[in-house]
Image: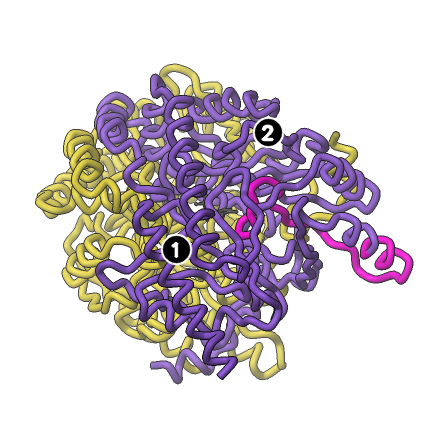
Chain colours: A purple, B yellow
Amino acid sequence: MSQTVDSFSFAKRIPATPSIGSTTVTKQDHVHLSFGFAAPHLFPIEQLSQSAAEAVTLHGRKALQYSGSVGPGQILKWIQARSQVHGIHVELDQILVTYGSTQGIDLATRILVEPGDHVWVESPSFFSALQAFRTAEAEITSFPIDEEGVRVDLIEHALLNAKQNGKPLPKFLYTMPTYHNPGGVTLSVERRKRLVQLAEIYNFFILEDDAYSELNFTGNRYPPLYTLFPERVIYLNTFSKIIAPGLRLGWIFADSNVIAKIKLLNLGGSIGVFTQEIVAKLLDGFAFQEHVDSLIDHYRQQRDVMANAVKNSFGEHVTFHLPEGGFYIWLRFADEVNTSDFLEDAANRGVSFVDGKSFYVNPEGFQYARLCFSYVSEDQIVRGVQSFADAYFAYINKAVS
Amino acid sequence: MSQTVDSFSFAKRIPATPSIGSTTVTKQDHVHLSFGFAAPHLFPIEQLSQSAAEAVTLHGRKALQYSGSVGPGQILKWIQARSQVHGIHVELDQILVTYGSTQGIDLATRILVEPGDHVWVESPSFFSALQAFRTAEAEITSFPIDEEGVRVDLIEHALLNAKQNGKPLPKFLYTMPTYHNPGGVTLSVERRKRLVQLAEIYNFFILEDDAYSELNFTGNRYPPLYTLFPERVIYLNTFSKIIAPGLRLGWIFADSNVIAKIKLLNLGGSIGVFTQEIVAKLLDGFAFQEHVDSLIDHYRQQRDVMANAVKNSFGEHVTFHLPEGGFYIWLRFADEVNTSDFLEDAANRGVSFVDGKSFYVNPEGFQYARLCFSYVSEDQIVRGVQSFADAYFAYINKAVS
Ligand SMILES: Cc1ncc(COP(=O)(O)O)c(C=O)c1O
Ligand SMILES: Cc1ncc(COP(=O)(O)O)c(C=O)c1O
């Protein structure tokens, strides 16, 4: 069997030996600080159950049919109205509903790049996005982040250098300007302005991934890049962090010409009418702002518990930026530390985290670790961080001895 | 705005001027013989409404979370069990749930072809599939069908010729062996056997699209190509014709190594857990065989009504193959007829159909038209076919005078 399969030459985007499947041990009592998942107890289950039944009964024949390339308008209108709260003004033909923002990343990548084209990313970056760029057979170059987000000065320097030396410019830059995953940082307003200028000057697109935009713990506001340059920013967002990821519903904002191009890839007509109708029904009459406020209160509290736990358990051994929103704390250890080396011991002690190198294109970032405070309870955070610290101290003591 | 967009060079897969949007006039009272849609009154709305509420309430937190790359097992088990009725025996790692078979076509294409690779299809073929191959930047070659399905002898001849002359062989052949869309024909058992032998000898894959498999009007059985050569056939099916298309749920069967490769593209973990849980709940305890039997009775009756209406309205002016299953009657007019030329007049007379050329890669097939009997009522079929005939006779009378 495998022999027959092996004799065929698959597309280059597909590695010869796929390595799939999570290796995380899922013991009872295991604390998953690795999971970037929304807190399930905050899913609006009852309302959704009711909306599901109602939507099917009321709009069943429509909700269950093919729907052309547009899908039901109600959810588009909700997205349009809600985005105004964030200063984004779009027409309906500038919106496309997707199977989560993960599909948005994939679709945008496929309209923008040919195999061999260049994509620039942040280091660290979101691993599913990196995987999408790899399967598009793009050449990936990365630029570091600091406390104020990605180093736009380095990007500018690289662009100038490429231009002067006739080297390839990027087709697009993928960035998470607000509440970065995993970095927890937010791009400053100055850098935002410069970045979109660069996109104009050097003729590239920006893929703005704004998955955590609603989870704003401080009230500080940053203009989405899309609002600064709607012609050259493809903006991605999702219901995954604000309603539930299992719905697989997200959206893209872009120039209507760009949306039209993306629709050409969106084969089989519009996506998940059934789910769209159910979610539209949910949102209709749902106290969304209250819901988001309770998410914010919860996640902010979780962040604080985790930040304290880290200080208590690690003392001066780590540094981190306190995130203004989102799900993650990104720990930096001393440069000689390699967090991959105590991943397994931590798992044996009942806690999972993601080691730094997983977020990089090149072999680097070993001295970082991502902890996620969204999925676990306060009690688990304290216990999990302590077990993680135990694994770390055992590791450095071994290194010393 | 458009200027900024136009100055960018998009991936070659994207045509410069997208032409999207249906041009079909949707008047009240218009008869849509063009829509290849399931009959909405046969959707199991009430059961689905109940399953939706129950699934969310019972499995809500699970159904709404990310689910890793596999998704809930229940629906896989249902698909596995049901397929045994059709002689297909698969392990769970040989199944992947997709967003309809349209996504299945796209995923299979992306693992198999690089831009410039060759894909062979039937002429006529399914237009969404052709669009998927074009966006993969494949070179497409087509082979005619007759009453017994695709002309495997011509495929064999072309393979031999390519081999002898060092010309490129196909990466895969896309085929709808059973109840072809639009042709209505079914591939004979002899040709099935030869086709899989050719796939083995010439080292290509077969993409077997079996979307209509359950809608068997005669009881005749044909072995799916997948059962003849599971290592080299990627088999696609869907809930669209047997439950409802708005769910966007389909599946792939393939060698487990091939499934593993496809999963690498299936970014964002498994698809639509929410929908999968709801459909699994529906199927659990649903009298599926009875449901399918009632679909078959209904569609067979519709086919007969349409076949009679065509005979009554067109007499000797058209020929067609009476389909053993599926949704379509494929009309052949005299060679000098161009059905595109009376599309608009037919629309003005209140009926839509799909003109022949839409199903071809090259400019051909003008003398054909596809009528679909699934979506409309018996009364509409009779009226629609008569209006269609009126448009045709007006067209040929004009040509003569
Ligand atoms: C930055 C970022 N983008 C996208 C996603 C995925 O979102 P979706 O569930 O909409 O595919 C995540 C989820 O972890 C994320 O962190
Ligand atoms: C041959 C064929 N394949 C696939 C499809 C699409 O199926 P799905 O709704 O599962 O994407 C259709 C629907 O018209 C079809 O006719």
Q: Nearer the viewer, residue B260 or A247?
A: A247
Question: Total label count?
Answer: 2
- Looking at numbered disc 2 in the image, what kind of residue is underneath it? Asn
Question: What quarter of the picture does the C terminus of chain B occupy?
Answer: top right
User: What residue appears at the point 86 percent right and 58 percent down from the top-left corner?
Assistant: A161
Q: Position of residue B141 (x, y in %)?
A: 55, 62
Q: Mark 2 lies on which chain?
A: A
Q: Position of residue B164 (x, y in %)?
A: 58, 83
In whole angstroms, how far apart are the C-alphas of marks 1 and 2? 27 Å
Q: Which chain carries label 1?
A: A
User: What residue appears at the point 74 percent right and 54 percent down from the top-left corner?
Assistant: A170
Identify the mark at residue A220; answer none if there is no mark: 2
Question: What quarter of the picture does the N terminus of chain B occupy?
Answer: top right
- Looking at numbered disc 1 in the image, what kind of residue is underneath it? Leu
Tell me whether marks 1 and 2 sit on the same chain: yes
Q: Where is residue B207 in the image (x, y as percent from the top left)?
A: 40, 63
Horizontal side of B88 relative to B334 (left or right) equals: left
Identify the mark at residue A33; answer none if there is no mark: 1
* Residues shaded magenta: A158-184
Q: Can residue A296 be seen in this view?
A: yes
* Quarter of the image where one finds residue B84: bottom left
Q: Is residue A101 above or below residue B75?
A: above
User: What residue appears at the point 36 percent right and 39 percent down from the top-left corner?
Assistant: A244
* Quarter of the image where one finds residue B311: top left
Please say whether residue A169 is one of the residues in the magenta stretch.
yes
**Mark found first going from the N terminus, 1 or 2:** 1
